[in-house]
Amino acid sequence: MITLKSTLLAASLIAAPSMAFAAETATANLIDASGKPAGTVQVTEAPKGVLLHIEAKGLTPGWHGIHFHEKGDCGIPKFTSAGAHVHTEKSVVHGILNADANDSGDLTNIHAAADGTASAEIYSTFVSLKGASGRPTLLDADGSSVVIHAQADDYKSQPIGGSGARALCGVLKQD
């Protein structure tokens, strides 16, 4: 039986303002060393970090390091114009498994299937799109990029975890 009390309760739930987080996003169109399209990375701001959704192709099968790099520049063929990893300190220590690590560009590895494609989602508490909560910003004046490396990151070796050459790169642009 529907009562006035249950009707008012239902109406108040429908009319209540949403407390959901209004997520900002940025997208990077990945390219390979010859400049050909190789997938996308979408970065979504979360209350305490960022969520990456990665769709990549053209990789060698196996594990690959992936990092946020400090400049929004993917000059081919080696992508060195993307600079070093995103960080806030002058002396940077790489590695999620390194007790002294302070490299905000660190992310977990992704895996490419036998056909060279990789689909993954990664969450990072190290950065923000626009500097929320004092975390390094990805959308600063010179931008940033997402780089997928040729090999896996061992999460401790300096300076990039042994992840090797830069295989794919994409400049982050706000959606």
Image (cartoon, helix red, strand yellow):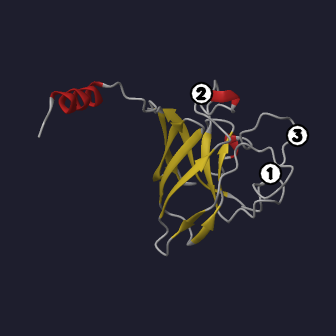
Quadrant location of the N terminus in the rendered image:
top left
The nearer-to-camera label among 2 and 3 is 2
Q: Amino acid at mark 2?
A: Lys
Residue at 46%, 53% (x, y): give it.
Answer: 39
Image: 175 above or below 81: above
- Of residues 70 and 10, the one nearer the viewer is 10
Q: CA distance from mark 1 to mark 3?
A: 10 Å
Whether pointer 1 and pointer 3 mark residues with C-beta atoms closer than 8 Å, the reply is no
Left or right of 89 in this view: 30: left
> Could you tell me if residue 70 is visible in this image?
yes
Tag 3 residue? 91
Quadrant location of the C terminus in the rendered image:
top left
**Which percent across, then down, holds residue 53?**
48, 50
Q: Secondary structure at mark 3?
A: loop
Q: Secondary structure at mark 2?
A: loop
Left or right of 175 in this view: 100: right
Residue at 65%, 31% (x, y): give it.
Answer: 137
Residue at 51%, 33% (x, y): give it.
Answer: 173
Q: Amino acid at mark 3?
A: Ser
Q: Compare marks 2 and 3 and give the one earlier in the sequence.
A: 3
Left or right of 87 in this view: 55: left
Tag 2 residue? 130
**Which percent across, then down, holds residue 22?**
44, 30
**Which percent across, then down, holds residue 102?**
80, 44
Within the image, what quadrant is residue 108 found in?
bottom right
Residue at 84%, 55% (x, y): give it.
Answer: 158
**Which percent across, then down, holds residue 136?**
69, 32
Tag 1 residue? 94
Q: Amino acid at mark 1?
A: His
Mark 1 is surrounded, within 10 Å at the Cα level, by few (under 14), some (14 to 19) or many (20 or more) other residues, namely many
Mark 2 is surrounded, within 10 Å at the Cα level, by few (under 14), some (14 to 19) or many (20 or more) other residues, namely some
Q: CA distance from mark 2 to mark 3?
A: 23 Å
